Image: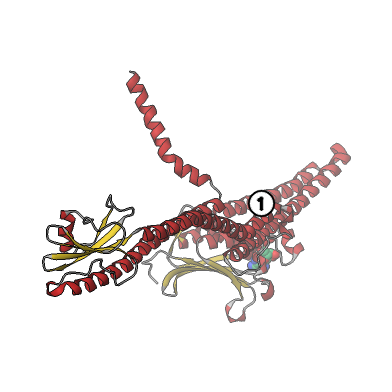
Amino acid sequence: MPAGGHLPRIRRLGARLVNWPAQWWAQQSLRARLTLIATALFTCAVIAGVILVLVGQRYALTRVLDQSASRTARDVAEQLTDGRRPANPIVPTTGGIAAVQVVDDDNRMIAASAGNGLQGASLVTDRQLESIRDGARLTIDPPTFPARLRVLGRKVGGRTVLVYTELNRVDDSVRILTRAALIGGPLAVLLMAMATYGAVTLSLRPVAALRHGAADITAAGLARQRLPVPGAQDEIHRLAVTLNAMLDRIDAATSRQRTFVGDAAHELRSPLASLRVQLEVAQRVGPTADWDAVLDDVLVDVDRLDRLVGDLLTLARLDESGSVGRREPVALDELVTSVVNGYAHARVPVRAEPAPVTVPADPDALRRVVINLVDNAARYANSEVVVRVGPTTRDGKPRALLTIDDDGPGIPAEERAKVFDRFYRVQESRSRASGGTGLGLSIVRDIVRNHDGRVRLTERPGGAAGLRAVVLLPAQPGEPS
Ligand code: ADP
């Protein structure tokens, strides 16, 4: 039981230990991380460089010693040719030579250079002599000599010229270099770390300025405040410019929203004020008031409030969804016919000329588009409204074309784009009196856009009086055109 209980705990501990470096790393500041990475890389480079220099130095110095030794070996060997006895003591012909010895096959001393007390015995063992005769260059540490030696030889018949050089000069010079590297390396790494830290701090200063700038921006100050843009044309400059552009867009959206809320409140206030006045008057008059007339008037205002709130809700939902969620094949011609049938008792006749066309759409939203446009047309037409719908193609793609013509007063060309704005009315009193909310066309535009379509108002063809609303929607492929 205890073992079974310990195992998961140990495993958890192990997992935590494994994860710890990653967690620790993630907690460090960007500055610290960059400094650590740069310093680690630089340290590796310094270590590799120092090793390379030390190895190279030792190799180069040893090579110089070897060259000098080979020359002396060659010179002494020349003296020995023809079986001559070597001069005793032998005189090295090049500098830096510690000793020269000539030995016979059995490693017995024949001659040696002066000094160092080397006259007595060979400094190499028999086995070493063998490999030297085979051309090897050896590093030896003979007990009879105070320093490490490097030895190479040259065969002359049965004899061998052995030339020794002292390695302590090579060792000394490598040691000095090692010491310099041990002091200079960490110093260089430290300087590098400090320089990196400083450079990163300097580079990140504009980021800190951006952060402070962003912290200072309040919702109220959005119209005036922007993030500081650094002068250098670098990534942070571009980031600041992009963020400021985003703030501009947010600001524009916020002020649009604010205007919309203000307008909505204003629109709601007038029917409410009218309601209040009517009710107050009726209250003052008392039971003798014409209550039927009061109720009729009150209902008109309630109707208007109802329409307004309904339109506001629709717009809010459209803003929220961005694009229609539900899309299904909708027979637009049938939808138009059914809407037009609802205008049988309208002030002017509303006529439909439908041709079969199917669009992928939200049927309720599309019905709303048709109703809003036909409502407007029927409201302003003098004698007739004609609604045409059918298939067409644009840029080689199937489209559904819906046009609604009325012979009313129309809209001046310069106002035709503006009437799609929320609460925009061509003639304030005319539209308001007719019960319009000023939101009908905004709703139409939003829905059509959400269906990837386009809507616009134009003149009627042939210069006829009135207005034509044109809606173009993507149609289901494979439609007859
Ligand atoms: P409303 O619900 O108040 O009519 P809309 O957004 O539907 O608001 O219309 C915006 C403006 O466009 C209104 O001022 C309205 O008078 C005008 N308008 C819309 N359709 C027509 C039309 N067929 N003929 C003339 N004016 C129109």
418 or 12, nearer to the observer? 12
For residue 256, say whether it is visible.
Answer: yes
Res 380 quadrant in image: bottom right
Quadrant containing the N terminus in the rendered view: top left
| Rendered position, 473 above or below 285 | below
Q: Is mark 1 on a helix, strand or loop?
A: helix
Give the colour scheme of this rendering: secondary structure
* Residue 287 locus on image (x, y percent): 85, 37
Residue beneath the point at 72% across and 62% down:
431
Residue beneath the point at 62% across and 81% down:
463
The residue wearing badge 1 is 307
* Residue 365 locus on image (x, y percent): 53, 55
Q: In this view, does 114 lie to the left or right of 448?
A: left
Res 103 quadrant in image: bottom left
Quadrant containing the C terminus in the rendered view: bottom left
Q: In this view, does 266 lie to the left or right of 151?
A: right
Q: In this view, does 335 lie to the left or right of 114?
A: right
Is the CB of the residue bearing disc 1 within 8 angstroms of ligand 1? no
248 or 401, nearer to the observer? 248
Residue beneath the point at 64% across and 76% down:
465
132 or 478, nearer to the observer? 132
Q: How crowded is mark 1: few (under 14 residues within 10 Å), some or many (20 or more)?
A: some
228 or 16, nearer to the observer? 16
Amino acid type indicated by mark 1: Arg
| Rendered position, 395 above or below 159 | below
* Residue 240 locus on image (x, y percent): 62, 62
In the image as oriented, which residue stretches furthest toward the front? Answer: 88
Q: Quadrant of ligand 1?
A: bottom right
